Image (cartoon, coloured by chain):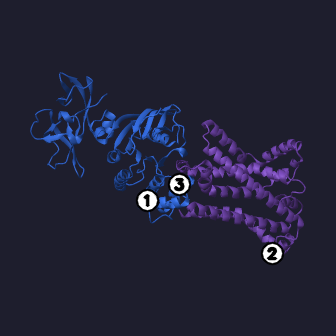
Amino acid sequence: MKKINLLVNTMAFGTMGFLYLPLMAVAFFSVNNTKYGLSWKGFTLDWYIKLFHNEVILQAAWNTLVLAVVSTLISTALGTALAIGMDRFPWPKKMNTALDLILHLPVIIPDIILAAALVVAFGFLRQVSSLFEPGLFSMIIGHITFQVAFVALVVRSRLISIGKDIEEAARDLYASTSYLLWKITLPLLMPGIIAGAMLAFTLSLDDFVISFFTAGPESVTLPLFIFAAVRRVVTPQIHALSTLVLFVTIILVFVMERFTRKLNTK
Amino acid sequence: MITDNKGLSLQGINKTYGKVNAVKDVTLDINSGEFFTLLGPSGCGKTTLLRMIAGLELQDSGSVILEGQDITRLPAIKRQINTVFQSYALFPHLNIFENIAFGLRSRKVPEKEVQTRVQEALDMLELGTMPNRYPHQLSGGQNQRVALARALVNEPKVLLLDEPMSALDAKLRAQVQVELRRLQQKLGHTFILVTHDQDEALVVSDRIAVMKDGQIIQFGTPEEVYDLPKNRFIAQFLGAANLLAGRFHDGMFHTDIGPLELEGPPPWERGVIAIRPEWIKLSDTKPEKNGIKAKVSEIIYRGTNLDIWFEPGAIRVRSSTYKNFKIGDELWLDLAAEELVVLNE
């Protein structure tokens, strides 16, 4: 028994190391006082300071944030409406299965396929309006297309766990559809909606493929910038930038965890 | 169609789910101020019927008439009928006060009136000390009272109760049954209870409708339904019954355990009669009529009485006298003619 325990523990720590050592290495090099090489040359925050004076990076960070916030807001509203519509409308059984499949498809199909499809679609739409030129607008639409499915899935699982009893009770107590939605359904769904939004936000934040295919010259995001920069040379500035993005993500996950737990216990 | 019935009237209600006939041609008149019970095993359609009265489900055909007014086409939010759900379905994110106030607030009742009416409901159901608590902080029995208060505060013309006691333990259930009965008599509202618990039905109801396979098979006061069960199903579902099959000829009903005299000729030649275990008298001497000599095969002690099984025929007798019976004792069973119920099947 002891031997098996040792093996399991080694595996567990090995996996953790495999996951987190590269990230820790990035954080390590971001405060290493040397431009090249892998040896420790003393602690510095120079790379972070330089980062905040780099106009290109700041612009990319701004683009990333705008893209993530706008696409998350829209996809959360659409995804929530979609989930409620799918779960609460009395669809016939076959239609329900079909809807389920359609909802899961964007989650399963490779990003690259979705990206290629978007390129084709925007190519057509460009003939109608110049709005669909590669750029931030197209990127927002691109991100929404894959975020909606994730939001809807998360919200729907929450809807199922709430059940229909409570809404029937509200109807029985004279609640109109809008009153029911505002006073009962949405408050009860809130943990699911917030979890879905957080997921959509992090997906948008680190998306590369969809952005790469839909971005214009003015709308470079952080992942696109890092990709382009790394192709030349990995600088400590990139390490610093990656470490910051990592931090933001960790904080987001932490906040989401706390928030949903708080709402769930209520 | 309009009737003069002051209460609730169901006329020819049908409902199918796919190929299943959940409710078949149900016609019922429920009086105003009456405690009415729909009793039946699970899956008999009683909850479906209740949901159609509430307006949460639409029947395929038939009408629902409340105080002479056809409400068949009205949705739940327009019916002056409220429901206590089996799961209580309290709003978990609202405190007890807001839960009870919900029906008043959604109809935009003035705030002052909301305050007084909710307070009255809280007091009536002894929830006065906990308006600021949340449902998850309350016990099952307390939540059940909240569900009751939440429905009653709207002063419904009919209160529907969908197995409201199934989540309570046996002792609390017995207590709540009596309280519910008292509450209904005090308020004088029409209550319709759905249950599969026959004891509960007998304790609380003015009248009972026994349902099976989507149909109402018997309908009457608890005494009528218990004393004169119409068929084998009701005899066995409501309480216990000894069923005796046989043939009627030459003025006597001939069974495996011997010939019995009936009060009158049955409407069939071959059929079944029932007698409840507590209606059979035991004696050491041969009764004048309908005496059967039998041997004790099993004795079950049940606290307030004994259940004694006899051979032949596996006849069960419930006796409250504590005579010292032993297995193997031979006794006379008195199956008096007036206690024999002729079942029509």
Question: Visible in this render: residue A8?
Answer: no
Q: Same chain for marks 3 and 1?
A: yes
- Do marks 2 and 3 share a subunit? no
Q: Secondary structure at mark 3?
A: helix
Q: Tell me the distance, in whole angstroms, between the alpha carbons under discs 3 and 1.
A: 21 Å
Q: Nearer the viewer, mark 3 or mark 1?
A: 3
Asked if labels 2 and 1 share a chain, the reply is: no
Tag in front: 2 or 3: 3
Chain letter corresponding to the colour blue: B
- In the current view of this chain or complex, which residue is farthest to the top? B250
Q: Nearer the viewer, residue B339 or A139?
A: B339
Locate residue A124: give its quadrant: top right
Q: Chain of mark 3?
A: B
Q: Amino acid at mark 3?
A: Leu
Q: Which mark is residue A40?
A: 2
Q: Quadrant of residue A29?
A: bottom right
Left/right placement of residue A235 relative to residue B12 reads right
The chain letter under disc 2 is A
Element carrying mark 2: loop
* Colour of chain A as rendered: purple
Q: Is residue A34 above or below residue A169?
A: below
Which mark, by number, is residue B142?
Answer: 1
Label 2 vs label 1: CA separation? 66 Å
Mark 3: few/some/many CA within 10 Å (<14, 14-19, 20+): many
